[in-house]
Image: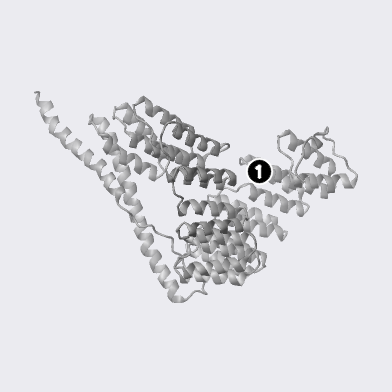
Amino acid sequence: MPNSARGAAPFLLVSQRLLMVWLGSIAHLFAISVQPTIDIHRRSSSAPPECLRRCKATRRRRLGLRHTEATALLSMVDLAVEAFKLAGHYGVELSVTSCNPMLAALVDQGKIQVMENVHKEMIRRKVQPDVITFNIVINGLCKAGKLQKARDLMEDMKVWGISPTVVTYNTLINGYCKKGSVGRMYKADALLKEMLSKKICPNEITYNTLIDGFCKDENFPAAMKVFKDMEMQDLKADVVTYNSLISGLCNDQKIHEALDFRDDMLGCGLQPNIVTYSALINGYSKKGMLKEARELFDDAARQGLAPTAVTFNTLIDAYCKAGNMDEAISLHRLMLEQGVFPVVSTFNCLLGGLYRSGNMEGVNKLLNEMKEHSLKADVVTYNIRIRALCQKGESRKAVRLLDEMFEMGLTPNHVTYNTVIDGYCREGNLRAAMTLRMRMEKEGKWANVVTYNVLIKGLCNKGSLDDANTLLNEMLENGLILNQTTYKIVKEEMLEKGFVPDINDRLYSQSVSP
């Protein structure tokens, strides 16, 4: 053996062992269960001082721990990727069992493009993938919304002589239910049929995912069909199954039907959990039945169930919309006392209520509290503040908040722009409204039906009916569907004032439900 080869051999051996250790350590690291951490923030000055001190101390401790853990996880994954690259450079062969944990870690951290690159490189280096490899990569693609790519990869499994498992199908079904676009539930349901045709037995996770997807898609009859199919397969519905059905009914304000399912749960020996209670509280709240919602909230505590931020937020929001700010603030205080720390959505509910009640002092205190404890306002927060300014006739100040959103790294949505455009229209400042529409479109948000309705009404109120008619034609030419509000504007602001829109009968070729 040449001297150079003898000298290189120990180095390659050591390198291989080191690389294998690095990659193997990822599997161990991500097998460790890390306790979830919660943002802790000091709350209203009305909370007991000892509670606030405890909150701050806990926040510092938990945030410090979380930062350390997150940094460790990131650095270990980055090390693993570098080790993977070095292995290729030195020609070190790696096993699929070393690479799979790295792929899973990349998916967990949302580094889907890196995961894809590593997977391609594995194939190039002839690292034989197994079913776990494919399931991990498919999961990553689904999380990134690359559903067709995930579907194609499942087909590629056959080329490698690997058959998709129930986990493969469940992953893809979950992807369509959560990330799919038009026809997503049809495709998810088609995957279930494909499973059955290939003699792959669906499990409880398969059916629960589909039921939840159909409920969120507001297609309760389809959810019930899957529920019955589940029973026909001799699979027992669990708490997750019932929670999805109950939540779907409550979102549709069918509280009595939801309560029937709750009773069915109990009849099957299943105990409702806090998710069940939160869904039912939401159902009562949507119906304006706040007394019943509060009774259910109190009953959850008697059953030993700890309310979550979602539970509190649901009831706080209901009280705020009902104008009962005393109860909303009281619940906010109770959250602190029970160690449930409000999130941005909690503050958004309270801000909306305080603005509606005209309590600007309370609004300012709440905004200061968010800043003091590093709770960043989101788009909803700004939309609430912008709407309040526009309703007061202060649209110019609202535009300053719009500019501030960009400075904070937030992207205004259609609601943001339409609110300010409406504010300008109500103030009779059509030039500013049109200018803001142009700015909106320059920033990638094309005018939608609401934008046109607001501008058309603003022009009509100014007496500029011909200009309003031009916008109406433009709306139709852009393929937008007129809604009930459009027809009402045309009837009340045009036809009843003796102005007949010149739109070549297109207005009357479309129909909306009465």
The answer to whether 213 is drawn above or below residue 293 in the figure is above
Residue 310 in view (yes/no): no
Horizontal side, residue 471 vs residue 169: left or right: right
Q: Residue at x 85, y 36 (%)?
A: 502
Q: Element at badge 1?
A: helix
Q: Is residue 103 left or right of residue 483?
A: left
Image check: 265 left or right of 12? right
Query: How many callouts does the rendering have?
Result: 1
Residue in view at x 75 percent, y 44 percent: 513
> Residue drawn 40% across and 27% down?
156
Q: Quadrant of the N terminus?
A: top left
Residue 422 in view in this figure: yes
* Amino acid on which the number 1 mark rests in the picture: Arg
Asked if 433 appears above or below 86 in the picture, the reply is below
* Quarter occupied by residue 306: bottom left
Q: Quadrant of residue 119?
A: top left
Name the foreground residue: 317 vs 413: 317
Nearest the camera: 454 or 143?
143
Q: Is residue 360 above or below residue 230?
A: below
Q: Position of residue 351 (x, y in %)?
A: 60, 63
Give the crowd class for mark 1: few <14, some 14-19, many >=20 residues within 10 Å. Answer: some
Q: Position of residue 155 (x, y in %)?
A: 42, 28
Residue 32 drawn at (x, y percent): 30, 52
Q: Position of residue 497 (x, y in %)?
A: 89, 47
Instruction: Identify the image's colour scheme: rainbow, by chain, secondary structure or one colour.
Output: one colour
Residue, x 13% and y 30% (percent of image)? 9
Residue position for label 1: 439
Q: Residue furthest top?
A: 2
Of all residues, the one furthest to the right in this rendering is 498
